[in-house]
Amino acid sequence: MWISYCRIWAFLYKAHLFSLLFANVLSSYVALCKALSLGSPSVPLMKRVSNSLAHSSIAASNLRIRVSGGDFKRDRCSTPLQIISESSAKPVLNPLYNLLPATQNPNKIVDLICLALTQRNSGLSDLRDEIKSLIPHLGDREISRVLLRFQSDASRALSFFNWVKSDLGKRPNARNYCLLLHILAWSKRFPSAMRLLCELIESFAEIPRKDDVFRVLVSATDDCNWDPIIFDMLVKGHLKMGLVQDGFLAFRKVIDAGFLVSAVTCNHLLNGLLKLNCTDKCWEVYQVMGRSGIHPNTHTFNILTNVFCNDSDIQKVNDFLEKMEEEGFEPDLVTYNTLVSSYCRRGRLEDAFYLYRIMYRRGVVPDLVTYTSIIKGLCREKRMKEAHEMFHRMVHRGIAHDVISYNTLIYAYCKEGMMEESKSLLNEMIGNGIVPDRFTCKVVVEGYVREGRLVAAVNLMVELRRFGISIPSEVYDYLIVSLCRDGRPFAAKNLLERIDEEGYEGKPEVYNKLMDSLCQYNAITEALLLKGKITDWNMVLDFTTYRALICCLCRAGRNPEAESLMMEMLDSKLKPDAYICGALIDGYCKELNFDKAESLLGYFAREFGIFDTGSYNSVVKAISEGGDAADKLICLQERMQRLGFVPNSLTCKYMIQGLSRLTA
């Protein structure tokens, strides 16, 4: 009897195991079909198999055998069939995948990539074709797994990361980036880490996200080796990308999290905030440095000196300098130059000279920047004699002048109208081998123009060209336009012809201004020649130039050419105005071509809505001055009224004059 019980128990136990195994095989089969894109098994087949499994499962698993007085008792227990969710975050490690070749097994994709990275010196360029069917299974989690396996080999980790981005065209997520950043920083590959960090910061700047780079970097420290320097690089990366405000926020987060930032990075941050004129935040950074134990250096104090100098409170600057000396930092040349420049900008020249003398006492020799700042300050106060004395004192101190120091004094002389002194300095400058720059030429020419000495300005430019000094195009533009405004279009034309031989390429506005000026002096031939030249250069005439040319042609009695030029103007999408209308009609009236004048009057009214009463009166006056004008005047008035012209008192006057001549 006992043996029979044991046999029955063994049979039921084997049935239970078989049912569980079959259920796992079935679920694995379904998962494999979906993973390999084969679709799901047929519904009838699944239904039949499920029903049979349900019966065998109840028979095998819901029975517990108890041997008690020869009776079998059943106790139901809850052992449901395990269902694999398709939406699970973790991939299904299906045992049936292992029946596939390694290059088709999704479970092996990480192993295959790691093996290729380890064994192939040429990289992963050939691997893509070998595991083509597995590429869709390479997700963010698999990328992280590969990176973590190569924590000690930053070169291969970076090679794999670039392969994923470039060859596969996948975009790693922020965590993938941060894992690689930690690996690179741990391996002291700081340039590569900075490039990658800037790329990540840029992606966050383009697409706003819930998390920021700092949070993802911190969370990634749980999975890999890391170096705290990466958080210092995070602040520096924002500054390198020009995101100063974001860099300041990153600095606060890094400090609040207990990490340190180097004094060099703090200096970069202070400098960026200073350029944005965020003086309050500069002071906040300095206070945080003190609380966090970040020791400032001389460069830090120089930046902060500049910060305080931008403030109007000079006493605050002096207090800061005293504190700087108490902490053991002696002001250096940069500190003194910052202060001297600030005092000179604010007109506090006595304080600037006091610092200038203190510098010598403390063994800090003033340099070119110091002297240039003082000279500029003296020039602002119009103390030209003292400025020139300081200028020469530089040479006695063994400091050579540069183009900036010369420009400072030349500009001041030109501003005061002292053109002889400025020219003398310019000649001295050239004699010392210092080439005048764009600013030098510009201020000297503008100085001569303000004094009304245009010819002297032109001669100076010609003289500079003999010395081989290049004159900027904008200086020539200014000279030509100034000559035109001064009523010297022919001098401007001669200058233009001379510099054209040197390869001068002027702006269209300059040529238009010159043509307009030539037309004002009825030099229509020269103006048309210039027009033909710039048309060959594909330059476009503006409205003012067309109007000047048309009016000048009409004054010269060349009305058909003027009308033709107006048609060219219309082709350039420019519309005529009443001034052009009046010029053409006056021209034809002078030729006594009343029909053409009336035709143009109607054309301008119909096509452009120009009802110029002055032009209408010109036609009426011209007709009334001729003989036998009564019928013509009456008919003209009727036709013009139908077009919409309204006669005024002057029209009536001309009509009466014309009719009175007929009566007389």
Image (spheres, rainbow, N blue to C red):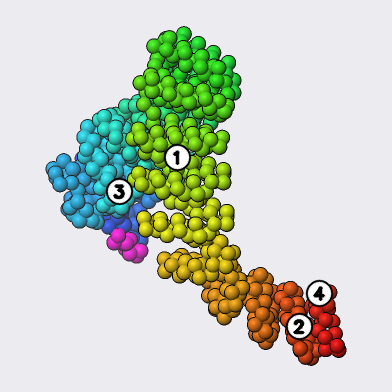
- Mark found first going from the N terminus, 4 or 3: 3
- Mark found first going from the N terminus, 2 or 3: 3
Frontmost of labels 2 and 4 is 2
Left or right: 64, with 248 as reference point: left
Q: What residue sits right under mark 2 in the picture? A: 625
- Measured as percent of width and height from the top left, residue 18 is found at 25, 49
Q: Is residue 442 visible?
A: yes
Q: Quadrant of the N terminus?
A: top left
Q: What residue sits right under mark 4 in the picture? A: 650
Image quadrant where residue 652 sits:
bottom right
- Mark found first going from the N terminus, 4 or 1: 1
For mark 1, give the secondary structure. Answer: helix
Relative to 460, does residue 245 appear above or below in the rendering?
above
What's the distance in space between the residues labelled 2 and 3, CA to CA? 88 Å
Q: Which residues are magenta?
A: 37-45
Q: What residue sits right under mark 1 in the picture? A: 440
Residue 573 falls within the magenta-colored stretch = no
- Amino acid type, callout 4: Leu
What's the distance in space between the residues labelled 2 and 4, CA to CA? 14 Å
Q: What residue sits right under mark 3 in the picture? A: 165
Tell me whether the residue at label 2 lies in contact with that at label 4, contact meaning CB atoms closer than 8 angstroms: no
Tell me whether the residue at label 4 lies in contact with that at label 1, contact meaning CB atoms closer than 8 angstroms: no
| The one of 86 and 115 positioned closer to us in this rendering | 115
Residue lying furthest front: 664
Image quadrant where residue 600 sits:
bottom right
- Amino acid type, callout 2: Glu
Left or right: 653, with 521 as reference point: right
- Amino acid type, callout 3: Lys
For mark 2, give the secondary structure. Answer: loop
Relative to 177, does residue 320 appear above or below in the rendering?
above
